[in-house]
């Protein structure tokens, strides 16, 4: 399975932009890049996902490198409520029937613990 | 509002007992998943189901069992064969793999 590498923790100030990096050098052409975040004792929350082009939604932006070997989640104006663990994950996009082995399930590493200072 | 409901939120079990965790979704999602999370760790996939009456083992299926008799429901049984069952269990669903997952709020299981 393609894996991702993220910094263990990052710190930012409230109301400033935050750029969370993710490396995925073994990504395949059909892997989607997903980002989730998790607050303590809660389930992960979907943030954004993309394949090749940069993506924007109400929560964040996702910038994907041209070679797709890295991506950056951008929180444009961090608030205290954005303090969480952020996971960058690859998800295979074959279709409902998988021809190869391996589970259809996102593989979550330890993520990046984002700390927001007031 | 649509979503995933996990119950109970907290569960205590005596050693040697089986226990079933509930997961219900009203999102009309085909695929459902069970994950386990230990303190300070990421999520590990236990079982997943892409369609009713079919399910597949994930990375750590030993000591667990599931069923998928209805599209809306995907209960997880933690059996006495699971050697270290104390953990935070998360259920998720997805319409298909190009879209995001929706997670439940989790069940914290403690073996006493």
Image: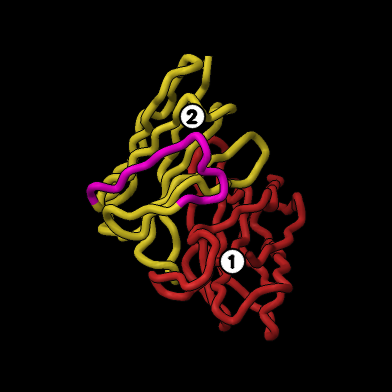
The chain ID associated with circle 2 is: B
Q: Are marks 1 and 2 in contact (CB under 8 Å)?
A: no
Crowdedness near tag 1: few (<14), some (14–19) or many (≥20) residues, C-alpha within 10 Å: many
* Left or right placement of residue A64 versus residue A97 in this view: right
Quarter location, residue A34: bottom right
Secondary structure at badge 2 equals strand
C-alpha separation, residue under disc 1 versus residue under disc 2 = 26 Å
Tell me which chain appears yellow: B
**Residue B95 location, x and y as percent?**
35, 64
Between residue A41 and residue A16, name the one nearer to us.
Answer: A41
Label of residue A47 in the image? none
Between residue A37 and residue B35, name the one nearer to us.
Answer: B35
Label of residue A90 in the image? 1
The answer to whether residue B1 is seen in the rendering is no
**In the image, what residue occupies the spot 29% across and 43% down?**
B24
Looking at the rendering, the stretch of residues picked out in magenta corresponds to B57-70
**In the image, what residue occupies the spot 27% across and 55% down?**
B52
Q: Looking at the picture, does residue B43 appear above or below residue A67?
A: above
**In the image, what residue occupies the spot 51% across and 43% down?**
B61
Between residue B110 and residue A98, name the one nearer to us.
Answer: A98
**Residue A67 location, x and y as percent?**
70, 84
Decide whether the magenta segment is chiefly helix, strand or loop.
loop
**In the image, what residue occupies the spot 71% across and 76% down?**
A69
Q: Looking at the picture, does residue A63 appear above or below residue A3?
A: below
* Left or right placement of residue B55 versus residue B1 in this view: right
According to the image, label 2 marks what residue?
A: B108
**Outermost residue toward the bottom in this view:** A66
**Residue A114 location, x and y as percent?**
68, 50
Tell me which chain appears red: A
């Amino acid at each position: 399975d393609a894996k991702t590498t993220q910094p263990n923790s990052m710190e930012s100030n409230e109301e400033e932009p935050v750029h969370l990096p993710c490396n995925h050098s073994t990504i395949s052409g059909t892997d989607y890049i997903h980002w989730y975040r998790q607050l303590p004792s809660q389930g992960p929350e979907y943030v954004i996902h993309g394949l090749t082009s940069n993506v924007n939604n109400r929560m964040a932006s996702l910038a994907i490198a041209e070679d797709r070997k890295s991506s950056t989640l951008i929180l444009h104006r961090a608030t205290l409520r954005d303090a969480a663990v952020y996971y960058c994950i690859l998800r295979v996009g074959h279709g409902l029937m998988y021809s190869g082995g391996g589970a259809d399930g996102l593989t979550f590493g330890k993520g990046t613990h984002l700390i927001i200072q007031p | 509002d649509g979503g995933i409901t996990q119950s109970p939120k907290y569960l205590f079990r005596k050693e040697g007992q089986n226990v079933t965790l509930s997961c219900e979704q009203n999102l009309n999602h085909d695929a459902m998943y069970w994950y386990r999370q230990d303190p300070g760790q990421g999520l590990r996939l236990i079982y997943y189901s892409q369609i009713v009456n079919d399910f597949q083992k994930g990375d750590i299926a030993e000591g667990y069992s599931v069923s998928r008799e209805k599209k809306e429901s995907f209960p997880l049984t933690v059996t006495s064969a699971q050697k270290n069952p104390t953990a935070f269990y998360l259920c998720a669903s997805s319409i298909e793999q190009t879209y995001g997952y929706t997670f439940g709020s989790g069940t914290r299981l403690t073996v006493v």
